Amino acid sequence: MATVTDRTIDRIECFDISHTMGEATIGSCVVFDQGGSRRRDYRQYAIHDIQGGDDYAAMKQVLTRRYKKQPLPDLLLVDGGKGQLGIAKEVLTELGILGDTLLISVAKGEGRKAGLEVLHFIDHEPLDLPMDSKALHLLMHIRDEAHRFAITAHRKKNAISVAHHQC
């Protein structure tokens, strides 16, 4: 992580939003520390009362619900670009807890191709790390785990909804 920040990072929380055409929206939070993933700290959030497909509103709801009750990690990672990162900053500012937490979003690069990820920061220019960067691989792994966890929850919610409507 030294290529990304000179801060000590003990805890990382990563968020992702999953839906199908705005339906059955789920937010996920995965947690990693020095020992790896902390599955017992993973959380899923059912999203309510937003316009279908509004990823920004969904991200705002998830982050607000999480950080009204939980302390901030050393690094808050969101799947997405500058917009999602701006939402994270807005939520933490509204809650009065922006503080020293490092905020980063990881977005697919040109053509949304995996392997061309760009890191966005609140306080400096985006960073393109080389593909052999250990920091990039770690952040991509954490982002992919948040994505997997969100999709798994979304599919389960969708299956329950379909089964309910067939009865």
Image: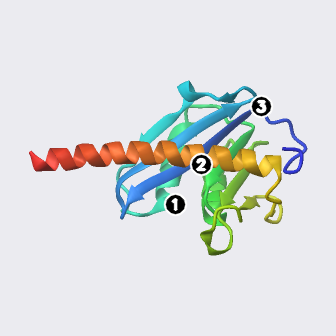
User: From the image, which quarter does the N terminus lie in?
Assistant: top right
Question: In 3D space, how far apart are the residues under numbered discs 1 and 2 (Cα atoms)?
Answer: 19 Å
Question: In 3D space, how far apart are the residues under numbered discs 1 and 3 (Cα atoms)?
Answer: 27 Å
Q: Which mark is residue 144?
A: 2
Q: Residue furthest left?
A: 167
76 is higher (above) or lower (below) than 114: above
Q: Which mark is residue 10?
A: 3
Mark 2 surroundings: few (<14), some (14-19) or many (≥20) residues within 10 A: some
Mark positioned earlier in the residue sequence (1 or 2): 1
Mark 1 surroundings: few (<14), some (14-19) or many (≥20) residues within 10 A: some
Amino acid, disc 1 = Tyr
In this rendered view, identify the residue nearer to me: 98 or 56.
56
Q: Which residue was labeled with disc 1?
A: 56
Secondary structure found at label 3: loop
Closer mark to the observer between disc 1 and disc 2: 2
Closer mark to the observer between disc 1 and disc 3: 3
Secondary structure found at label 2: helix
Q: Residue furthest bottom?
A: 111
Q: Residue at x 65, y 32 (%)?
A: 71
User: From the image, which quarter does the C terminus lie in?
Assistant: top left
Location of residue 40 in the rendering, given as x and y in whole percent from the top left corner: 54, 25
In this rendered view, identify the residue nearer to me: 49 or 139.
139
In this rendered view, identify the residue nearer to me: 44 or 147.
147
